[in-house]
Image (cartoon, helix red, strand yellow):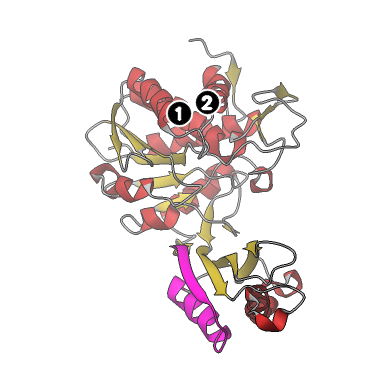
């Protein structure tokens, strides 16, 4: 195909980078629709580009590994699953306007994945070693990446770029995740005689009150631990004392805190209350050296300083087997999971440039 556009840094950019993103957006890949079709599309595209591919991981959370070359190169990492489209959109899925591409996953993170597919194809044509790792369970439990990190190409890689949206600033630190569910049990009775029952809703109130100062926005800082009460359900009917209540809570925490530390904070706060606690998911916080060769080269090439991000990615899982990990990708994280999500075509071009540059820098 002919190169009809050039990126801001002068590298030729294939016209079908945007088309690849449109293809990915057109394939629904939220939890309801499943990952198989979008994984199959990415696999076919990378096979056609000459990369060797294989599927790893559990059937319900498959991951795609595509490699070219025998020597160690860069790993381009992304996830192809999205949250549901949701309501409130004014733009159509895949609509292009004013240099933007709209659609669920455009920024989180099919835009980066489209750039990775095209950049990997270009590097393979140049016989530059490269690996692409696409997962399909990042938005839920991050199960797919557990199989990816067992791959030799990942463990030996010269560097790993996790392409989550950072506005193309290299991110070297992110918070960990601790999600848990509280359950309180009571005894039903007629609401006109609540003393004959045992109100589970009231018990939950006492529990949440113990955590309230951690969840109040006024007491939270973007760099510290945050807590969010996300769901609460209980009771059966308006004239019945509630015999059960559940609340789900999401905690984000920075280093040096660990999931164990967060667990202890919560248990100590709730001492003396009547409840049951289930930990649904936890992920370690992540931090790399901002002065590492990878971060320095990213900053130099992009002309931006390293940043800290408040959200979680697959970076800590990669870092458990390879220390040369950085988070960097096109788009604004504030648009992720929102109506009228979009990514700037200009940033797709810059991401493509960056991936080519890194791949060529580390070859051999």
* Residue depicted at 36% across the width and 39% down the height: 63
Q: Label 1 near label 2: C-beta < 8 Å?
A: yes
Q: Quadrant of residue 364?
A: top left
239 falls in the magenta region = no
Q: Nearer the viewer, residue 346 or 9?
A: 346
Q: Is residue 170 above or below residue 240?
A: above
Q: Which residues are magenta?
A: 258-282
SS for callout 2: loop
Q: Which residue is mark 2?
A: 27
Residue 113: give x, y in percent of width and height: 49, 33
Q: CA distance from mark 2 to mark 1?
A: 6 Å
Q: Is residue 326 above or below residue 221?
A: above
262 falls in the magenta region = yes
SS for callout 1: helix
Q: Is residue 285 above or below residue 272?
A: above
Q: Is residue 32 above or below residue 321?
A: above
Q: Residues within 10 Å of mark 2 (few under 14, many from 20)?
A: some
Q: Can the viewer see residue 14 in this picture?
A: no
Q: Can the viewer see residue 343 in this picture?
A: yes
Q: Nearer the viewer, residue 314 or 56?
A: 56
Q: Earlier in the sequence, mark 2 or mark 1?
A: 2
Q: Nearer the viewer, residue 85 or 309?
A: 85
Q: Residues within 10 Å of mark 1 (few under 14, many from 20)?
A: many
Residue 288: give x, y in percent of width and height: 45, 61
Left or right: residue 215 versus residue 41 is: right
Q: Nearer the viewer, residue 18 or 298?
A: 18
Residue 284: give x, y in percent of width and height: 44, 64
Left or right: residue 320 versus residue 290 is: left
Mark drawn on residue 196: none
Q: Which residue is mark 1?
A: 38
Residue 351: give x, y in percent of width and height: 54, 35
* Residue depicted at 60% across the width and 39% down the height: 84
């Amino acid at each position: 195909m002919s190169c009809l556009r050039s990126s801001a840094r002068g590298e030729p950019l294939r016209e079908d980078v945007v088309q690849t993103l449109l293809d990915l957006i057109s394939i629904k890949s939220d939890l309801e629709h499943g990952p198989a079709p979008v994984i199959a599309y990415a696999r076919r595209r990378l096979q056609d580009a000459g990369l060797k591919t294989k599927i790893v991981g559990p059937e319900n959370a498959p991951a795609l590994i595509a490699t070219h070359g025998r020597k160690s190169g860069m790993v381009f990492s992304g996830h192809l699953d999205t949250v549901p489209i949701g309501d409130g959109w004014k733009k159509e899925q895949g609509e292009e306007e004013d240099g933007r591409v709209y659609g669920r996953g455009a920024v989180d993170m099919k835009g980066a994945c489209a750039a990775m597919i095209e950049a990997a194809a270009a590097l393979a044509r140049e016989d530059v070693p490269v690996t692409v790792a696409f997962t399909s369970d990042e938005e839920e439990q991050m199960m797919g990446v557990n199989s990816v990190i067992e791959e030799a190409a990942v463990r030996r890689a010269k560097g790993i770029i996790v392409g989550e949206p950072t506005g193309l600033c290299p991110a070297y630190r992110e918070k960990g995740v601790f999600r848990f569910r509280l359950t309180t049990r009571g005894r039903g009775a007629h609401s006109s005689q609540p003393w004959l029952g045992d109100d589970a809703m009231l018990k939950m109130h006492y529990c949440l009150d113990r955590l309230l100062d951690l969840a109040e926005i006024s007491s939270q800082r973007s760099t510290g631990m945050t807590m969010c009460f996300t769901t609460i359900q209980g009771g059966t009917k308006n004239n019945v004392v509630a015999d059960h209540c559940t609340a789900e809570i999401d905690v984000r925490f920075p280093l040096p805190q660990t999931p164990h530390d967060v667990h202890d904070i919560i248990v100590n706060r709730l001492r003396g209350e009547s409840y049951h606690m289930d930990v649904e998911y936890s992920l370690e916080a992540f931090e790399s050296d901002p002065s590492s060769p990878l971060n320095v080269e990213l900053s130099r090439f992009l002309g931006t300083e390293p940043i800290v991000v408040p959200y979680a990615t697959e970076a800590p899982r990669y870092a458990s087997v390879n220390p040369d990990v950085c988070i960097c990708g096109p788009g604004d994280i504030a648009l992720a999971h929102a109506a009228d999500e979009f990514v700037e075509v200009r940033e797709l071009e810059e991401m493509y440039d960056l991936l080519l540059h890194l791949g060529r820098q580390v070859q051999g």
